[in-house]
Structures are given as C-alpha cells and as structure tokens.
Amino acid sequence: MSVIFDSSFIILILALIISLFAQHKINSTFNKYLQINSINGYTGAQVARMLLDYNGLYDIPVEIISGKLSDHYDPSNKVMRLSQDVFYGASIASIGVAAHETGHAIQHKENYVPLSLRNSIVPVVNLSSNLSWILFILGMFLGWSGLFRLGILLFTAVVLFQLITLPVEFDASRRALNILENKSILSNDELAGAKSVLSAAAMTYVAAALMAISQLLRLILISNRSRD
C-alpha cells in the first residue's frame, strides 16, 4: 500500500514543481517587458480605455488596484482594475496585460459561454474549496470514509473551475493580441513581446489546473487505500 501513497505524493510534487516554474516564468517575463516601452507611448490605462470604448463598453471604469499582477476584470461590478505597473506603465507588458483584461470585458459583453459558466459556479467553488479540506481532515481523524469521499466530491468543483478557466484565459489573450494588431497599438516586434507575457501568464493557469487535478488524484488514491 505504501507504493500507492508514494506514487500519489510524487504526482503532487511534480505539479508543485511545474507551478513554481510557471510562477518564475511569468515574473521574469513580465519584468523583462515591463522595462521596454512601446513606441506609441500609451499607458495600460489608456489602452484599456481605448479598447473598451472601441467595443462600446463606455460604462466600464478603469481603476487602479494595489499589488503586482493583481489586474483583473470584475464581471459582478463591471469594473476593470489594473495594478500600478500596468495602469501607469507604457511598457509592452503593461499594454499586453491591459488588453488581456479588456478581452475578459468583451467576453462578458458577448456572454462567452465558458466565462458565464465559470462565473456561475464561483459561489459553489468558494464554499467547496474550504469545506472540502475540513471534511478531509475530519474524515481522516475520525476514520469516517464517507466524510473523506464527500470532501473529494466537493473538491471536484474546484478542479472543474480550474479547467473552465483555461479556455477563458486563452480566449482573452487571443482577443487581446488580435485587437492590438488590428488597431496598430503595437508593432510586430512589440506584439511578439506581449505574446510572450500573455503566454507566460497562461502557463500559470495550466499549472493551477494541474495542481488541482493532482490533488484530486492523490486524495482518490488515499481514499482507495483506506478502503483496502
């Protein structure tokens, strides 16, 4: 039985290594292109405003938020929030990230199915992500396999959320690069830099999905072991 446990632990370690690499990749790539200003000199905030207006999203404000790479579009309040580096920065990285978040706003406007599905399960995921681990711990300490299996069932919602997130993020990046090219906001060389930043960011979402899947597989293996 130790082979099963060891194998499940190895799965988790590999996923952790990939996650750490992905985090290093986005930080290094973002910092690299944060130092390279675009020829047009637009800031991230200006690009976001231009692209939002171009798509008829005049009612969506662009606000500044603290933190690094904390940029996001809030579909509940219809607000785009950009970190200081992106909001004020005129770099390739700043413009790429701002365009990516605009991509999410456009998805919301068009009722992009994966985004709508992801937003609809957020309350369930928030509950299940916390409750699942409580059930895991109680099930192990009390020896109640039913609680452990219920925790696994709840954690499945977290895995589903991570998987749905992938097409949402990939599509937002695709939209961002297309509109930056079509509106001639970035040159071809600059566009390649923005693509590198967004590709590195996408890797973090892939890593998060792998981590969630690995955790789920490990928990299933442990649950099976406890029944043997």
Image (cartoon, rainbow, N blue to C red):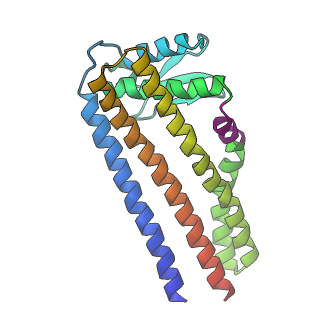
Residue 65 can be seen in this image: no
Given residues 4 and 77, the one toward you in this image is 4
Q: Does 214 sit above or below residue 5?
A: above
Q: Residue at x 58, y 23 (%)?
A: 106
Q: Does 14 sit above or below residue 98?
A: below
Q: Does 216 sit above or below residue 187?
A: below
The outermost residue toward the right is 146
Which percent across, then down, holds residue 216?
Answer: 59, 65
Given residues 125 and 49, the one toward you in this image is 49
Magenta segment? 112-120
Which percent across, then down, holds residue 8?
Answer: 51, 75
Find residue 150 and report its image quarter. bottom right
Give the prevailing secondary structure in the magenta stretch.
Answer: helix
Q: Residue at x 36, y 25 (%)?
A: 94
Which percent across, then down, holds residue 107?
Answer: 61, 28
Looking at the rendering, in which quadrant would you find the N terminus?
bottom right
Residue 98 counted in the magenta span = no
Q: Residue at x 69, y 85 (%)?
A: 227
Given residues 70 and 109, the one toward you in this image is 109
